[in-house]
């Protein structure tokens, strides 16, 4: 859980920016989006395979140049 202590003479905007950066580093938003709705295990497996195919195609395109 990210915690940001506001320093003396620090504006709210700067502290908020530090908090957002620490949340991004901790991966909270990506985890939240992943858990937003339930995926059945079979659908999760299909998505994982599709992502692997996409990565492989992208790698092949880069190698052919």
Image (cartoon, helix red, strand yellow):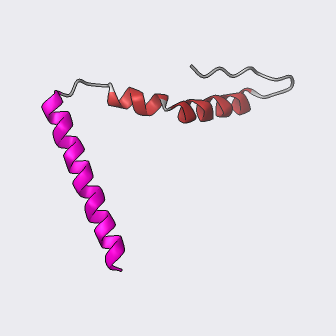
Q: Is residue 62 above or below residue 18?
A: below
Instruction: Give the image location of residue 25, x and y in percent.
Output: 56, 35
Is residue 40 shown left or right of residue 15? Answer: left
- Picture coordinates of residue 58, whole percent (x, y): 31, 64
Q: Quadrant of residue 43?
A: top left
The structure residue drawn at horizontal position 45% and vertical position 31%, both measured from the top left corner, is: 29
> Which span of residues is magenta-colored?
40-65
Q: Residue furthest bottom?
A: 65
Q: Of residues 38 and 63, which is closer to you in this image?
A: 63
Left or right: 6, with 51 as reference point: right
Task: Say if 54 sits above or below 10 in the image.
Answer: below
Where residue 19 appears, x then y in whole percent?
63, 28
> Which quadrant is home to the N terminus?
top right
Residue at horizontal 86%, vertical 26%?
9
Relative horizontal placement of residue 59, taking residue 41 as reference (left or right)? right
User: 56 or 15, which lies in front?
Assistant: 56
């Amino acid at each position: 859980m990210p915690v940001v202590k506001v320093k003396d003479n620090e504006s709210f905007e700067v502290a908020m920016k530090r908090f957002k950066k620490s949340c991004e580093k901790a991966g909270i938003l990506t985890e939240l989006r992943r858990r937003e709705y339930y995926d059945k295990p079979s659908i999760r497996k299909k998505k994982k395979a599709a992502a692997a195919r996409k990565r492989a195609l992208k790698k092949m395109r880069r190698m052919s140049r």
